[in-house]
Amino acid sequence: MSEATPKQIDVLVVGAGFAGMYMLHRLRALGVSAQVVEAGSDVGGTWYWNRYPGARCDVPSVEYSYSFSDELQQDWDWSEVMAGQPEILEYANHVAERFDLRRDIKFDTRVTSAHYSEEQRRWTVTTDAGDVYDAHYCVMATGCLSMPNTPDIEGASDFEGAVYHTGQWPHEGVDFSEVSVGIIGTGSSGIQAIPVIAEDAKHLTVFQRTPNYTMPAHNRQMTDEFRAEAKANYATIRQQQRDSQAGIVGYGFGFGGADLIMPSDHLLETTAEERAKAVDEEGFGAIRRFIDIGLNPEANEMACDMYRTQLGRIVNDDATAEGLKPRDYPIGCKRPVIDTDYYETYNRDNVTLVDLRQGGIERITRTGVQTAQGHFEFDALVYATGFDAMTGALLNIDIKGRDAKPLGDVWEAGPRTYLGLQVAGFPNLFMITGPGSPSVLSNMIVSIEQHVDWITDCIAHMGDRQLQAIEATPEAEDAWIHHVNDVAKGTMFTSPSCNSWYLGANIPGKPRIFMPYVGGVGAYRKKCDEVVENDYEGFELTA
């Protein structure tokens, strides 16, 4: 295919993760022509790339799965309450094969530009393979956590050992036996990887900038009884997910059963003795039943004290325990992390914590890392430094809308969208789980399915009424941004002491704006449905 002969299609989809795969499935059923372009060599999205040791979903397997096909639900058997990366990728491959998706996916190809023609009301999309597509609609299924972030540290290129990033892990795996390893970062990927790497490595040195709050996963093998009960109750489970706050019903401990702890008590109404007893009896789980933790800073700090008390009981060395204790920011301002034996790992003789609050990284050397506390040597370096979340993958593409205005310019002060679905000035361009939608504050599969269904119905509506373009209005976009910020006010997410990737705080120079929608997937779904019922209120539809 040459630039002189662009391929005409109805819909161009960027990305073949869970969003892109379902989008393709729905578009086929609609009867429109669709092409998916994927940078990886196969399906799976984040689960294709993130193969680091210990990679695991933090949502129950029966809930982190597609709901669109009852046959798929009934036929697939999950082995664990919370599945690991290999099993999730196996599931993605199964879906691709079951619905014959790969024939409309071009792999090993990265979209480089997407430019809108106002005259033609179509998108011209180019790839690094030289392909050119002429598409009526462009759907960005690029994922919220798909652009790895590697910090710019002086001397990074000087290190002579092997270097890895958790978000771009070698598919053949890495053998760390007889190898000393340094790992930078203790976010979700670091907390999952550290215990597993420590089991194999000769020595593991952990460089921690900010200690995280993490809760034990209590993961386990799924019993036949639990699996059968879930399959029998899938209709109820799915409806509860869609109506819920986060798209999660039971966090793996049943689905609305007696062992599901719902926050209802108020921590501010307890005594010091009652809080101490709760930690004695329930450990980290003691804080799960207090509803005021997420809204009241004083209650939150009480919960932080309870958390630090339990942490100190697990880690044997007092200095290491102190270094691991989160301080000066609230529980809940960052995405919750779950772990398997994370704190217990620091009781191993071959693990060293470097608390960078006591002196930060100065440079990377040929043999290790130089900090203000001294030099630490190792053979291999792992970056567990996360992603340029929410916007990174989109801004990595040269997207130009009306009047050839770049998306990067429009988002210079932070991402602006209407419902996280569209951006004013970019007609016929849709985002799946974009900024301004529940996205990363929710079970991604639930949010993905809702967005894909909405976009598919919208495209069908456009075709039925012979409409050519749909675009969010600036007024609707402004109102939605105001609403997103208003809902987030007073929560721990927007606490002045909270520096999270929800705000873009992990990327130097990135505008600080709260990106996800806190209102919950149930309320958000109702809003999206109301928009449609009111004849696509907030969108301008062009004949």
Image (cartoon, grey):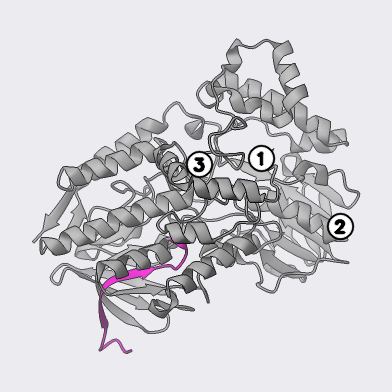
Q: Are marks 3 and 1 in contact (CB under 8 Å)?
A: no
Q: Which residue is mark 1?
A: 212
Q: Which residue is mark 3?
A: 248
Estimate how packed mark 3 is, as few (under 14), some (14 to 19) or many (20 or more) residues with alpha carbons within 10 Å: many
Q: Are marks 2 and 3 in contact (CB under 8 Å)?
A: no
Check the picture and name the quadrant holding the C terminus: bottom left
Q: Is residue 109 left or right of residue 483?
A: right
Q: Is residue 486 left or right of residue 509?
A: left
Q: Amino acid at mark 2?
A: His
Q: Amino acid at mark 1?
A: Asn
Is 71 in front, or is 535?
71
Foreground mark, 3 or 1?
3
Using the rendered view, name the quadrant where residue 170 is placed: bottom right
Image spot of residue 425 (x, y percent)? 22, 56
Q: Which residue is mark 2?
A: 203
Is 17 in front, or is 335?
17
Q: CA distance from mark 2 to mark 3?
A: 38 Å
Nearer-N-terminus badge (3/1): 1
Using the rendered view, name the quadrant where residue 333 is placed: top right
* Range of magenta residues: 1-18
